[in-house]
Image (spheres, grey):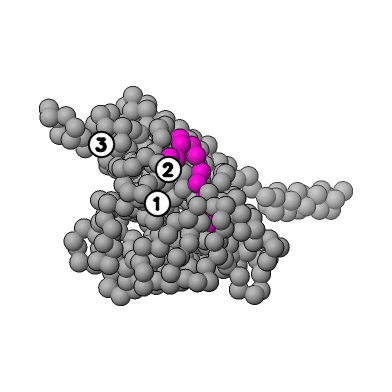
Amino acid sequence: MKKLILIFSTLSFLFLSCAEQPPVAVDGEGRIEVVVLWDSTYSENTSTSLPVTNAKVFLSSRYGMRISVTDENGKIYLENLPTSTYGLSVRKPHPVDPNIMLIGAKQDLSVISGRTLHDTIFVKPISATGIVINEIYAAGPVNNIFYFYDQFIELYNASDSVRYLDGMIVMRVSGNNEGKGPGADEDDDGDIDGVVYAFKFPGYPGEKNIPIYPKQFVVLAVDAVNHKNMISTSIDLSNADWEFYNQYSPEDIDNPNVPNLINVLPFRTQDFLINLINDVIVVADGRDSVLLDGVDISTIVDGVEYQPNPHPQSKKTLDPRVDRGYVLSPPRYSGKSMQRKVPGFDTNDSSTDFEIIDPPTPGRQ
């Protein structure tokens, strides 16, 4: 009997000592408390930081995106967050000028379940014309014959009023590989250098013949054809809104049913093509048409830099006055595209604004 009791006691001790202990904290209990402030200059009577009320706050991570609104004190409380690295972006229309947005962002916020992260975001006024680059498809379709002629750039009118594309110029700006790098203001003279290609909408800035309506997508195809006829994994761009056409190239494809953006640099005789994994794309209003010395930053409507997955040698080169971040591009010949997470969503930080999608979605979101 004593032997049985001893065996039972020993087994009980071993069972209890080997049993899995309950976790001390459950994931999904992280919290962020942020106050959003603005060093206002629109009022002559104050120079102090004002709380930004009723501003949209976009929280992004590998788990997706959440949208919240700041309270009357400019604060936002975000709860039930799993352990992860988060990005926060804030935007609100300027209280006086509807063409300006108050924009701020914070990246690489490390949230740990069971803890509260406190931070402050200061917003800055950013000009908002309403027209943005919404999607860039550069990688090419899945194939093994190096086909990538199905590239396109998609524009979007994020405003609530009609805008006009007359005279606007779409550029690839990556020719200055030395010095500060592609898209940089090399001489600190207010322009970005290294224009490689520049293709123009018909007309002149200020004219109103080419409207882009509120919430409208406009697809600019390198070649406006059905690329599925060449590569089955590709896309149909025969119904694109516009086509890049180089009138100085006898070999460039021209779909007669699609209007043309035409080349403004006569010495460039190649088709408008962008790098598959790293480049700088800029849209300017066309007021600066002398591009050999760079494009005036004050005329730039939107610009996006994209690079492959970051490595120690990677660095952002596009001037931060145009965009403060860069998009992580998909691999070559992956059939994947880079698109804003929300149509027209622009915090002037492409690291936050864009995501990789599969398949591309020309003309829609």
Q: Mark 3 is on which residue type?
A: Trp
Q: CA distance from mark 2 to mark 3?
A: 36 Å
Which residue in the structure is indicated by mark 1? 202
Q: CA distance from mark 1 to mark 2?
A: 8 Å
Tell whether position 236 is magenta. no
Mark closer to the chain start, 2 or 3: 3
User: Residue lying farthest top?
Assistant: 72
- Dot 1 falls on a residue whose secondary structure is loop
The image position of residue 269, as x and y in percent, is 43, 72
Which residue in the structure is indicated by mark 2? 210
The image position of residue 118, as x and y in percent, is 36, 40
Mark closer to the chain start, 3 or 1: 3
Q: Mark 1 is on which residue type?
A: Pro
Residue closest to the eye, 68 or 95? 95
Quarter residue 253 falls in = bottom right
Q: Residue at x 56, y 56 (%)?
A: 256
Q: Which residues are magenta?
A: 210-221
Which residue in the structure is indicated by mark 3? 38
Is residue 332 depicted above or below 15 in this figure?
A: below
Q: Residue at x 45, y 65 (%)?
A: 246
Q: Mark 2 is on which residue type?
A: Ile
Which one is in front in this view, the residue at disc 2 or the one at disc 3?
2
Quarter residue 207 falls in = top left
Is residue 257 depicted above or below 177 in this figure?
A: above
The image position of residue 102, as x and y in percent, is 31, 38
- Is residue 179 shown left or right of residue 142? left
